Amino acid sequence: MTSNLKDRSSGALPRPAVGTAVLAEFRRTPLLALIVFVPVVILLEQTVPEAHTWLFLLSVAAIVPLAALLSRATEAVAARTGDTIGGLLNATLGNLTELVISFAALQAGQYLLVKASLAGAIVTNTLFMLGGAFLLGGFKHHLQEFNRVSARFQACLLFLATIAILVPSVISEVDRAPAAAFSQKLSLGLAILLIAVYGLGMLFSLRTHRELFAAVGHADEDEKPWPLSVSIVVLIVVTLLVALVSEIFVGSVQIAAEHLGMTPAFVGFIIVALVGGAAEMTTAFSAARANRLDLSVGIALGSAAQIALFVAPVLVLVSYFVGPEPMSLQFWPGAVAMMLVATMAATLLSNGGRAAWYMGVMALATYAIFGMTLFLLPPATPL
């Protein structure tokens, strides 16, 4: 009798627990309220496919909560699989929103949008997210500390990836005759090299020298991860929804950008990067306010390193099977310059292991300079 009651009680617990967890998640992440735009944009695309401006705006609003759910589910899965597998999952799924959007643009042959979104995500994470964390955290805390060894390591990975992007871009300017064929072959080799370097970097930071990357005396938040089964279901369902909404976004972006006075380069560099990283930014800013700057710096620089060393090379490899033609790592000179400056700025800002609010002002001002430049003077030729 006791066992039957126990079985009944154990079987009845998950339903209210799940409902409570859902309500708590919406209170913790207000961005999830935008989830109502997901069915709206899908329905609008079926009924009024020529309303490109509205489809663009609604798809942007719909991607934000989906990105938040993806980030939360990824954290929950990684928390239950250990550091090594969790690190691999974060590398694969941490920037899944940007990857899916770029994959949809890749299929459509919009290589300028793909490259602009990749460069924009790197610059946005290293300047806007890191600067915002320094600024918001500095408003509440006079001086904050973080693990400078971990920050330097991520900045070095970013610098390496930027050099790998710089080389094919410079070579194409020096010798134009074999530029296309040579750039594609070089990009393929560099993509494989960068993925290998990133894999070894995870081995170094998560296994052989993980004691160097410990947080500087800040405890983790007391937050229970989702059940593994719930996390996996959320990952699958939300990934499908992101893919569907991303197709709508890519299909409407060109005409909508013209109507709104924006170029695909600006949309990719600024809009896609901010939308795709909205969930991570929320976590980074909240952590900085809670005096957990190690987490904020790790999210900002770690996410940028993932994009530079993992997402971009994967898209180069995938383009051989999906895109109209293979995509290279050749970016327009302005994008390369912005990535180099952003990497140097992140290195300088994180070098001391301490942060104050004015450091955030400097990073955000640099990002604003890039945004205004791209909006007013976009690149003339798509690469």
Image: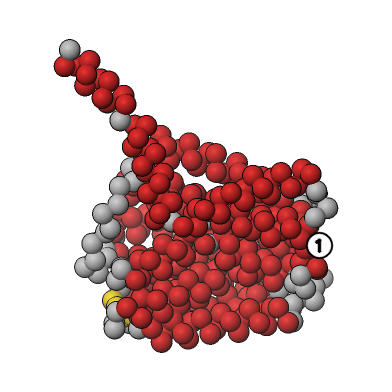
Residue 233 sits above or below residue 197 on the image: above
Q: Is residue 165 left or right of residue 50?
A: left
The residue nearer to you, when weighing 179 against 210, is 210
Q: Is residue 1 left or right of residue 355?
A: left
Q: Is residue 68 left or right of residue 374?
A: left
Which of the 4 image quarters holds residue 211? Answer: bottom left
In the rendered view of the protein, which quadrant contains the C terminus?
A: bottom right
The residue nearer to you, when weighing 90 against 157, is 90
Q: Amino acid at mark 1?
A: Ile
Q: Residues within 10 Å of mark 1 (few under 14, many from 20)?
A: some
Which of the 4 image quarters holds residue 352? Answer: bottom left
The extreme top residue here reads 1
> Which residue: 79% across, 44% down?
47
> Which residue: 56% across, 79% down?
367
Residue 310 sits above or below residue 152 on the image: above
| Callout 1 secondary element | helix
In the rendering, at what x and y percent does residue 4 appear? 22, 15
Residue, disc 1:
255
In the rendering, at what x and y percent does residue 359 appear? 41, 84
The extreme left residue here reads 2
Regarding residue 308, the answer to whether it shows in the image is yes
> Which residue: 30% across, 47% down?
224
Regarding residue 106, the answer to whether it shows in the image is no
* Colouring scheme, one of rainbow, by chain, secondary structure, one colour: secondary structure
